[in-house]
Image (cartoon, coloured by chain):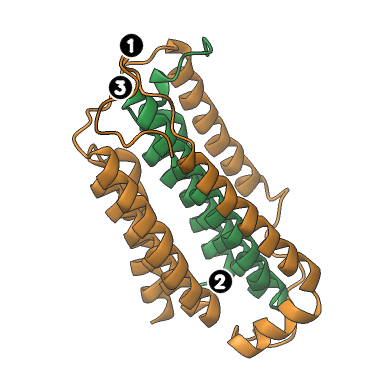
Chain colours: A orange, B green
Amino acid sequence: MEAFVFLVAAAGAVAGAVTLILAKNPVYAALGMLGTLFSLAVLYVTQLAHFVAAVQVVVYAGAIMTLFLFVIMLIGVDAVEDTSERLPSQRVAAVVVIVGAVLFGGYLWLSNTFTWSLARAEVDPLVGSIEATGLILFREWLLPFEVTSLLLIIAAIGAVALALFRPARRHVGDPGSGDSGGER
Amino acid sequence: MTPTPEWYLTLAALLFVIGLAGVLTRRNALIMFMSIELMLNAVNLTFVAGGSLVGNLQGQVSVFFVLVVAAAEVVVGLAIVMAVFRRRATADVDELSGMRG
């Protein structure tokens, strides 16, 4: 049963990821990303990381993807992507790197020089409830947690600053008129 | 047959490579951003799987920090995309060749 859930969620995650990188329309790409995020939430639940799964749905699927969809709608979904390459060697290099990474991973897998199974702990797998994660977060990770609030404030100020200062209008010789509302 | 953490690590590696392929091949800035988010999600899955592998919750706590960094990155990144779009009316990163890049 657990393997079945894993296989279904993993298939959903991979299908969403492939949709993301292959879709012509950015909206379809965002929907594929959304499917991947929900599938990952299911996988977190199967690993008893309940709070992480809830945060995944609320923050990623709720907030971040909504932000992405807003920007996609603002920018326009009908922009045709030019797939011709200005650096022709780049695509070849990308294929070489990906194939090389896959081959290297397969070599590590087959040669058993790298084992994933670290010392399997004898304790029971803990349930990632809000209480348990909160205790660790506020006892052992308090300073990093507070620093992240600083990071978020900086990011918010940076986003506001980027949105606030508009570039000068391009109409040379007629800077004052127009329906732009001027500088803000 | 119950899935072991190795299954999750394999899936995370696969998702990371797919996201990397998206960053390398696509030209739409928004889709490149979403591919980066996909790579961060693959790392999150690695953290959770590694946490259950060693049997504590530190991995799950690390996910929250990755999540905060991802949120901050998305906010600033999308603001940059919007600023570029207002100036250039495009979301194609190849168009941004003003510095001969």
**Percent from the top left, x then y, of residue B61?**
67, 72
**Spot occupied by residue B63 in the image (x, y as percentages of width and height):** 61, 66
Residue annotated with mark 1: A173
The residue to which callout 3 is attached is: A83
Residue type at mark 2 is Thr
Whether B40 is drawn above or below A52: the answer is: above
The residue under the point 61% across, 47% down is A110
Q: CA distance from mark 3 to mark 2?
A: 40 Å
The location of residue A138, given as percent across then percent down, is 75, 80
Would you identify the image quadrant in which residue A14 lies? Answer: bottom left
Asked if one can make out residue A141 in the rendered structure from this viewpoint, the answer is no
Mark 3–mark 1 CB contact (< 8 Å): no
Q: Nearer the viewer, mark 3 or mark 2?
A: 3
Image point 64% across, 90% down: which residue?
A: A131
Q: Secondary structure at mark 2?
A: loop
The front one of A47 and A87 is A87
Dot 3, crowdedness within 10 Å: few (<14), some or many (≥20)?
A: few
- Kind of residue indicated by mark 1: Gly
Distance from disc 3 to disc 1, alpha carbons, whole Å, reads: 37 Å
Camera-near label (2 vs 1) is 1
Residue type marked 3: Thr
> On the image, numbered disc 2 is attached to which residue?
B4
Q: Earlier in the sequence, mark 3 or mark 1?
A: 3
- Residue A48 appears left or right of B51: left
Provide the secondary structure element on which disc 3 rests: loop
For marks 2 and 1, give the CA distance.
Answer: 68 Å
Instruction: Read off the chain for label 1.
Output: A
- Judge by depth and name the residue closer to the eye, A11 or A180: A180
